Image (spheres, rainbow, N blue to C red):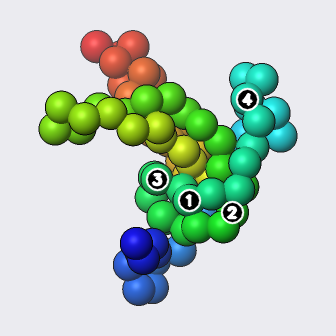
Amino acid sequence: MRALGPAAGVELRPVRSAPVSNYDGREWVTGMCWLYCRRSGIPVIWLGPVNSSGMQAPLYGCGECVAELDHMVWAYLEAKDRL
């Protein structure tokens, strides 16, 4: 299976700093980022199981994409708190 990267001309940069080296006690492994960049052969961390179409698989993310995900969660929570 060929890993797809970001769209041409798109550069992903973390909005907040990348996660610490041992994120919540989980170990970094070499693998494919299942989030935005979809790069392979890079350090990734297990984020938890993901469910899709009645199936389940492990979800891994690289430091940059996990930082972007963290930013999106914070933005959601800050907007929710304003309501």
80 relative to 15, above or below: above
Q: Position of residue 21 (x, y in %)?
A: 83, 40
57 relative to 31, above or below: above
Residue at 69%, 63% in the rendered image: 42
Q: Considering only order in the chain, which callout, 4 or 3, is on the residue closer to the N terminus?
A: 4
Q: Mark 2 and mark 4: span between their CA atoms?
A: 16 Å
Contact flag, marks 3 and 4 (Cβ < 8 Å) = no
Looking at the rendered structure, the kind of residue marked 2 is Ile
Q: Position of residue 23 (x, y in %)?
A: 74, 31
For label 1, the SS is: loop
- 32 displayed left or right of 9: right
55 relative to 33, above or below: above
Q: Position of residue 50 (x, y in %)?
A: 37, 34
Which residue is denoted by mark 1 in the rendering?
Answer: 32
- 56 displayed left or right of 78: left
Contact flag, marks 1 and 3 (Cβ < 8 Å) = yes
The crowd level at tag 4 (other Cα within 10 Å; few <14, some 14-19, many 20+) is few
Which residue is denoted by mark 2 in the rendering?
Answer: 42
Contact flag, marks 2 and 4 (Cβ < 8 Å) = no
